Amino acid sequence: MIDARQLTKRYGDKTAVDGLDFVVKPGTVTGFLGPNGAGKSTTMRMIVGLDAPTSGSVTVNGRPYARHQAPLQEVGALLEAKSIHPGRSAANHLRALALTHGIPRRRVDEVIELAGLGSVARKRAGAFSLGMGQRLGIAAALLGDPQTVMLDEPVNGLDPEGVLWIRNLLKTLADEGRTVFVSSHLMSEMALVADHLIIVGRGRLLADTTVGDLIREAGGDTVTVVTQDPARLRDVLAGPGVDVTGRIGSEELQVTGATAREIGLKAAEHGIALFELTSRSVSLEEAFMDLTRDAVEYHGSTTAVETLGRPA
Ligand SMILES: Nc1ncnc2c1ncn2[C@@H]1O[C@H](COP(=O)(O)OP(=O)(O)OP(=O)(O)O)[C@@H](O)[C@H]1O
Ligand SMILES: [Mg+2]
């Protein structure tokens, strides 16, 4: 369990993390989302004591990280995958970590196997590709068989097999009753793996919710209906929680708060002809973009590309 209370970090006049209150519970995968520069990595660094809060506090399993007798057995973290001595082999890197933490040598072999590093374990870590480095970082995070696992963008750089591996790994760790806290920008992946979400923007908490609730609040399913008589269909669909929109003069309506089946039955009951009835779910990506629109600090631009013009 991770418990942040009014957690705040300032760098000069920049407030990277601004009064965050949240709890990450065991037994589920909690996604940590937010635009670039939102304060996710800074929060994660404070969780494991690599950065000191300016104010507020954060505990892991009831204590500040530094007060744990055996921190690696308490929290396994992947923050900077490349923070490895480049000349050391993967196996030696893990062995050194294990030795300094009283972890048996067979556990090193176990995590090498688990992370799919068997064939490269004796190679210099400095020569690892991005994905191999990520795998080694994850192996190190799991070395102490910790109750809490925290990974900063673990999917970054992994091949499709690696992405699937992480997905199953995170779910298994949560099913074993562990606390799993993971940041990512890949919304499709988060939608598959996370149950709970903590979303930040400009250092502030924007949402502490479930994937299902976030999507529901963003409009849930939208049903597009094309009908001969939009005005009458609007009337018969009207009710609490049902929202119908559509351009004046158009036969097409967008309905939220009613399923395609309910709309079809209502239309049949009133003898209203339908030409089309299509249901579409709001994706986590759309819900996220909606929620964080005002919190995005670094916007890309397509006009800059257009003004570059074609090469001569
Ligand atoms: N050591 C530091 N010194 C000064 N500013 C910092 C430092 N670390 C982070 N920041 C600033 O704090 C803010 C939050 O950064 P952070 O890396 O936590 O964001 P993030 O949510 O992890 O972003 P990303 O999705 O890009 O990884 C940014 O504006 C960043 O420039
Ligand atoms: Mg980051």
Image: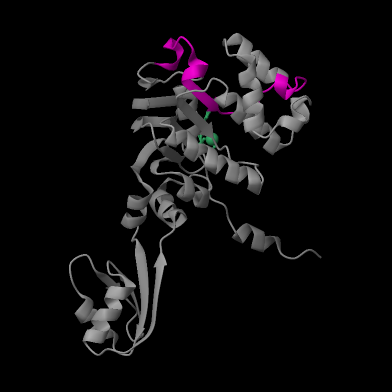
The reply to whether residue 225 is in sight is yes
Q: Quadrant of the C terminus?
A: bottom right
Q: Residue at x 44, y 16 (%)?
A: 65
Colour scheme: one colour
Residue 55 x/y as whole percent: 36, 20
Quadrant for the N terminus in the image? top left
Q: Does 189 appear above or below 131?
A: below
The span shown in magenta is 64-91
Would residue 49 be visible to someone looking at this image? no
Depicted 286 relative to depicted 91: above or below? below
Residue 281 vertical position relative to residue 208 in the rendered view, above or below: below
* 150 relative position to 61: left or right: right
Q: Does the magenta stretch include residue 81?
A: yes
Report the front residue among 301 and 291.
Answer: 291
The image shows residue 60 at horizontal and vertical percentages of 40, 21
Image coords of residue 31 (percent x, y): 44, 40
255, 311: nearer the viewer: 255
* Picture residue at 46% right of the left edge, 38% below the top: 38
Residue drawn at point x = 40 percent, y = 16 percent: 64
82 left or right of 169?
Answer: right
Outermost residue to the left: 240
Image quadrant where residue 13 sits: top left
Q: Is residue 217 left or right of 137 when viewed as pictured?
A: left
Q: Where residue 7 sits: x, y (%)? A: 37, 26
| Front residue of this view, candidates 252 and 113 | 113
Foreground of the two, 23 or 94: 94
Residue located farthest toward the right when viewing the structure as drawn: 312
Q: In which quarter of the image is ligand 2?
A: top right
Q: Residue at coordinates 18% horizontally, 71% vertically from top-left?
A: 239
Is 118 in the magenta?
no
Total labels drawn: 0
Quarter of the rendering containing residue 24 = top left
